Amino acid sequence: MSDDARKEFNPLVQRVDALLRRHQEAPKPEDDVPVLTEIIDPNAARPARGVDRATVEALAEELENAVLLRLAPELDRVFEERLAGTLGDMLEQVLNGMRAELAASVHMMVREAIAVSVTQTLAESPQDSDSK
């Protein structure tokens, strides 16, 4: 079987041939594609734009405010998530510290009260034993 015979039986080859024939037969328009005719030097100085510094600063400030306005809800959510976890841990540490300080204060107060009571009891005891 020759190459020509294979082409006739292969539907893909037939479709490609038909497409090529269509493009060859189609009339070519003269001004179909726009062409750049002016040569531009990339190193040439660019003309100054009509935007002054105050306008640029105003646009920058407006852009900054717009970005912050759109980011604010997301920032709040992220801060709340991080703060919730951190705050829980910190609150637990603070409460444990306060609990320890309170226990130490109560322990010291009880010790002092017992010491005062024992001292008073010992001071009163000799009188009671002499009177009997």
Image (cartoon, rainbow, N blue to C red):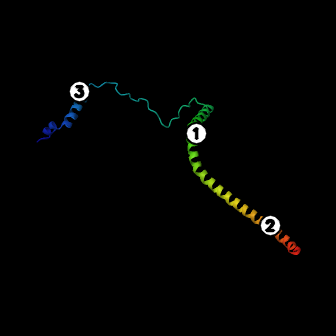
Dot 1: few (<14), some (14–19), or many (≥20) neighbours within 10 Å?
A: few
**How many angstroms separate mark 2 from mark 3 (CA)?**
121 Å
Image x and y of residue 5, in percent:
13, 38
Are the residues at dot 2 and dot 3 in contact (C-beta closer than 8 Å)?
no
Query: Position of 33 compared to 2: left or right?
Result: right
User: Exactly how many numbered labels are in the figure?
Assistant: 3
Question: Where is residue 64 drawn, in percent x and y?
Answer: 59, 37
Q: Earlier in the sequence, mark 1 or mark 3?
A: 3
Residue at image mark 1 = 72
Task: Measuring from the top left, give residue 93's x and y in whole percent.
Answer: 63, 56
Q: Identify the residue under disc 3.
A: 25
CA gap, disc 1 to disc 3?
62 Å
Chain-order first, disc 1 or disc 2:
1
Screen quadrant of the C terminus? bottom right
| Res. 11 image quadrant | top left
Say whether disc 2 or disc 3 marks the residue closer to the N-terminus. 3
Amino acid type at circle 3 is Glu
* Residue sitting nearer the eye, 127 or 52: 127
Label 2: element kind: helix
Residue that appears at 85% across and 70% down? 124
Query: Height in image: 69 above or below 94?
Result: above
Q: Identify the disc placed on residue 41.
A: none
Q: State the residue at coordinates (80%, 69%).
A: 118
Which residue carries the number 2 mark? 117
